[in-house]
Image: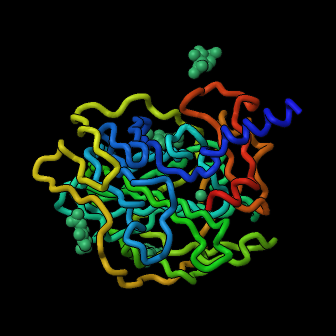
Amino acid sequence: MYRLSALFISLLAVAPYVSAHGFLGQVSVDGTPYRGNLPGKNQGSSPIRMVADISPVKGTTNPDLTCGLSAQAAALTVPANPGSNITFQWEGGQDGGQDWPHNVGPIMTYMASCGSTDCSSFNASGAKWFKVAQSGQKPDGSTWYQADIMQGDSYTVTLDQNLSPGGYLIRNEIISLQLASSMGGVEFYPACAQLNVGGNGNGQPNGTVSFPGAYGASDPGIYTPDVYNPGFVYQFPGPALSNLQAVSWSTTPAVAIDANFASGVAAPSAAPSTAAAQPSAAPASSAAPAPSSAAPAPSSAAAAPSSAAAAPSSSAAAPASSAASSTASAPGATGSCRVRSKRANANATNADRRRHFSRVNRRMTH
Ligand SMILES: *[C@@H]1O[C@H](CO)[C@@H](O)[C@H](O)[C@H]1NC(C)=O
Ligand SMILES: *[C@@H]1O[C@H](CO)[C@@H](O)[C@H](O)[C@H]1NC(C)=O
Ligand SMILES: *[C@@H]1O[C@H](CO)[C@@H](O)[C@H](O)[C@H]1NC(C)=O
Ligand SMILES: *[C@@H]1O[C@H](CO)[C@@H](O)[C@H](O)[C@H]1NC(C)=O
Ligand SMILES: [Cu+2]
């Protein structure tokens, strides 16, 4: 009896975390970490465009497909170079500190030049995106690289060596397909960071697209009724890889979220979670937050063939990730979300980690 109620209480305690989607918690450039703001809580300067909420973007014509839910321009644009390693650390839960909750679907990365505008005031609605990397199913054909992210891993792309110098948005997008067997069920989690690329490259990207516009609701990589069927072969949505595609990509060991925001630029005073413009630090930047009213953009680019596994050694075994492999869901486990604390206690053992009840989750989360 006591045990039962203890279990019940712990279930209650977990419940708020169970309905956890997630967000891009940190981006690192050649090992220098830049943490992001929690969704809707502007606490410091970051190159990551803050989103309003941990929920997914829904719908292929949604203007928030550019950089995430009501994404606001970020105060910082941080240095990078051709050949730089850009590492994305995703988190789960409203306050982060948990692992990314989904394991089925692709991870794709795009870039777009900010042109003559500083990226901190660049309106992403007009961006011309080129695809630099895409990661789908692993060679076993049944698990996805996204499952590594659910284990806590980060994701790294190495920029093309011939990128032209200038400001770029880099858009790392996780698509979660656990509900995509229904039209419109797909969950988009795009996130953008602002980079200033140096060097003296002169490459010009081919095959640029707009968001929204690059995906259609019935594209084979967006509407996936067969995603849990054995032998399913994923077809990436959006354009083919650009000539300026990443040198390589891989899932990489977990990176702890930095305790501090990057210094050097004054933190904007905390803004309420309204979609108010934030960058107080950027002069002349009338900053471009928010839900553009933009009409659905011209639909370019049909679904691309899976030029899939051109990738190098993926999935370097992450220390943090091996621990929980027993809870990694097989592809048949619809929409499981595993939840554990990371930011709070880097030394958490399996036993310390909150257990996740996928059945509860299935009812509550998506
Ligand atoms: C990027 O990462 C690879 C693999 O760890 C490493 O060999 C390379 O030197 C890194 N590049 C830079 C610019 O740090
Ligand atoms: C860009 O050009 C390369 C050949 O250089 C081609 O393989 C690729 O499909 C093109 N990408 C797009 C998006 O058109
Ligand atoms: C960004 O551009 C879109 C489309 O032109 C426009 O609707 C929106 O108002 C712009 N946003 C800002 C903050 O200027
Ligand atoms: C984790 O363990 C290491 C070594 O035992 C210790 O130095 C560190 O302070 C611990 N970190 C936390 C967050 O408990
Ligand atoms: Cu979700």
Q: Is residue 227 visible?
A: yes
Q: Position of residue 106 (x, y in %)?
A: 59, 63
> Where is 286 relative to 153, above or below?
below
Q: Residue at x 42, y 43 (%)?
A: 38
Q: Would residue 55 be found to the left or right of residue 289 on screen?
A: right
Front residue of 203/86: it is 86
Q: Is residue 317 visible?
A: no
* Percent coordinates x, y for residue 72 in the rendering: 31, 55
Indicate the quadrant containing the N terminus: top left, top right, bottom left or bottom right: top right
Question: In the rendered image, which quarter contains the C terminus?
Answer: bottom right
| Residue occupying image coordinates x 70% and y 37% | 354
Q: Residue at x 30, y 56 (%)?
A: 275
Q: Does residue 126 lie above or below 18 as drawn?
A: below
| Left or right, residue 305 beside residue 115 | right
Query: For this rendering, which residue is in front, 237 or 140?
Result: 237
Q: Quadrant of ligand 5?
A: bottom right
Name the one closer to the observer, 3 or 344: 3
Image location of residue 209, percent across then percent down: 38, 75
Please tell me whether residue 345 is drawn above or below residue 84 in the rendered image. above
**What's the image's color scheme?**
rainbow
- Residue 310 in the image: state x and y as whole percent: 60, 63
Q: Residue at 69% across / 54% down in the picture?
A: 361
- Number of marks in the image? 0
Q: Nearer the viewer, residue 17 or 310?
A: 17
Where residue 331 sits, quadrant-wise, is bottom right
